[in-house]
Image: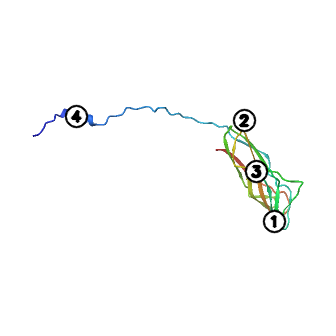
Amino acid sequence: MKQFIPPLAIGAVMALAAPAQAAPVAASPSAQAQALILVPLTLTKVDDLDFGTVISSPISGTVVIPADGSARSAAGGVTLVPSDPGLRARFAGAGSPGRLVIINATNPGTLSNGLGDTVTILALTLDGSPIRTIDPTTRAYFFHVGGILQINANQAEGLYSAQFDVTAEYL
């Protein structure tokens, strides 16, 4: 025996079986957009890096200017002239208080006397971590750069120099 189901009943059953459409719902809580604006960093050279006056010999050697302010030293055949002890480079900057800054000093590689003679900078060093915190009260940050200079055997006399780049960026 066959049962007859009216078409209207089939339509009602299918409508009930179909998934209901959800009504749009707002996010709770709502999202927020924001931006933190910082003042541009400043960076100023206060003092140049100066390896001081040295005397070369038939033996090569090195001169070290520590970034931490301790005394200059020499190794190998280099003699230091006490009346010109050299100086670490000093930099000062300013920015948004309490923010972190990363410092980078790029080694120029060599110093030249302008006559074709060169000496090699083996390394530039910072007086501590390259990451500094800008003072929350003064908005300032400071750091020093030292280095290690290679003096060749029988190095030609003269004033040797080169520029080196120092950068500071917010982290």
Distance Cα–Cα, label 2 vs label 1: 48 Å
Q: Residue at x 31, y 36 (%)?
A: 19
Mark 4 vs mark 2: in front: 2
Mark 2 vs mark 3: in front: 2
Asked if the residue at tag 2 contacts the one at tag 4, i.e. Cβ–Cβ closer than 8 Å, the answer is: no
Residue 107 sits above or below residue 8 on the image: below
Residue 121 sits above or below residue 59 on the image: above
Q: Amino acid at mark 4?
A: Gly
Asked if the residue at tag 3 contacts the one at tag 1, i.e. Cβ–Cβ closer than 8 Å, the answer is: no
Q: Secondary structure at mark 3?
A: strand
Distance Cα–Cα, label 1 vs label 4: 100 Å
- Disc 2 packing (10 Å; few <14; some 14–19; many ≥20): few
Image coordinates of residue 53 in percent, x first then y, are 86, 56
In the image, taking residue 111 as reference, residue 31 lies left or right, namely: left
Q: Secondary structure at mark 4?
A: helix
Q: Amino acid at mark 1?
A: Ser
Q: Which numbered tag is attached to residue 137?
A: 2
